[in-house]
Structure formats: structure tokens, C-alpha cells
Image (tube, rainbow, N blue to C red):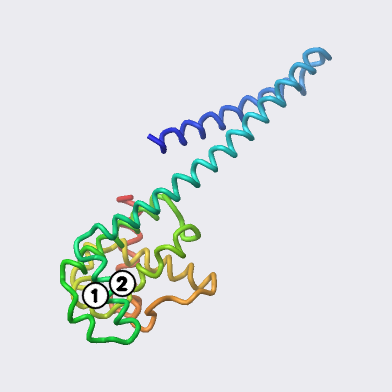
Amino acid sequence: MELINIMKKEHYYTVSIIVALILCLTLLFNNSFATRIVTIVTLCYALLGAAALLVQNKRDKDINQASFILEYSKYFYSLSNAEDTLLLLDEYRLGNKDSIKKIEYRGIVNCLIWCEELSSLIQKNVFDFTTIDNVFSYMFFTIVNNEFVQKEELLPQADFYKGIFYLHKQWSDYKKKTNQPIPMEDEGLQKSEIYLSYVSKGNIYNKKSF
């Protein structure tokens, strides 16, 4: 419902701009002084209304986006074994290589499903990398840039995770562009033999499906 309301506000904003343009044309081609005064006043009100709608719409978008990110973060921790898996993968990242022996298969699958859905949300422009980078990049790259996760599930079942490959490429490019380190890059997904072909498939997949 909140997203629908935002779309309605965007519609009102567009209508206000159109009205303003029509009034501008009226002002240019009408020679009556009184009519011009009325048109100028009306134009001012239309522009002020459009500006107010624009500011309010941006504010509503920011609030709803922040709420959505919070809910999506909660969603990760609600998935069976996902939190435990992430903690064990983090231990692995910090040097405890034996930690992966404790990881359950269900946890890997749920973590990857979360990452695949994140790709869908990016493709739908629900949010962008600027918004989610500090929140989710550690989680995403810690999960997918892990040789164990890749070997156990991600690479053998790559057809089910096309979005992850595409998101990995886009996010890695963003990280490099903004001069940020990529977690677990030494075991990066880009080193797999199928990476380039699945990045391409993911691109097609996202455009058709999302």
C-alpha cells in the first residue's frame, strides 16, 4: 500500500508539471494583461505544489526503502541455519579453516537463496548499491566468495543461481569503481571456469524475469 501511495504521488507530480507547462504556453501567447497576471499566480502555485510533492515523495521513498532494507535483513536471520552459516563462514574468513566442517547444507542453500533474491531486488530497482553496500556487501561476498560454498552448491547448481553471478559482477565493478575492498576476493566467484558464461546468462535471466 505504501508503494502504491508513492506511485500516486509521482503521478500527481507529473500532472503538476504538465499543468505548469500549459500555463507557461498560455502566458506566452496571451496578450491580455489581466489574464497574464492570473496565469502567473496560477503557475507559481502549480510549481510550488510540484516542488512540495517532489520533496515529500523523496522523503517517503527514503523512509520506505530504509524500512524495506531492515525487513530484508531480518528475513535473512529468519532463514533456517542462515545465521549460523554466516558466522562459520566469517570464522573461515578470519583464518579458522576448520569452521566449514560444521556448516550444514541447509544453511548454505538458504544463504544462497537470500543472495539470489537480493539480485532480483537490485534488478527491480528496489534499491541500488549506494544504498545497500554498507549493509549487505559483507554478507553477500562472504557467502559467495567462498570455495566451500561454491563447491558444495553454487557451482554445481549454477542454473538456479544465475542472478548471483550477475549481481557478483555488478557489485564487484561497483566496489572497484569506488575503491573499496572486496571480501574474500582471493576465493572470488570470478575465478570459476563458468563465471563469464553465467554472468551473461544471469544478465539475460534478470532482464527477462525481473
Q: CA distance from mark 2 to mark 1?
A: 7 Å
Q: Secondary structure at mark 1?
A: helix
**Which residue: 20% across, 66% down?**
81
> 35 above or below 16?
above
Residue with the mark numbered 1: 149
Mark 2–mark 1 contact, CB under 8 Å?
Answer: yes
Q: Quadrant of residue 59?
A: top right
* Image coordinates for residue 130, horizontal then vertical, percent: 50, 60
Q: Along the polypeptide, which appears first: circle 2 or circle 1? A: 2
Residue corresponding to mark 2: 144
The kind of residue on which mark 2 rests is: Val
Near mark 1 (Cα within 10 A), the count class, few <14, some 14-19 or many ≥20, is many
Residue 192, horizontal then vertical, whole percent: 29, 79
Q: What residue sits 44% from the left and 53% below the top? A: 127
Residue 207: percent from left, percent from top:
35, 53
Identified at 16% across, 66% down, the residue is: 106
Secondary element at image label 2? helix
Horizontal side of 35 relative to 76 (left or right) equals right
Q: Residue at x 24, y 75 (%)?
A: 149
Q: Is residue 64 left or right of residue 78?
A: right
Category of crowding for the residue at label 2, using alpha-carbon neighbours closer than 10 angstroms: few (below 14), some (14–19), many (at least 20): many
Q: Looking at numbered disc 1 in the image, what kind of residue is underneath it?
A: Val
Percent across and percent down for residue 77 are: 28, 60
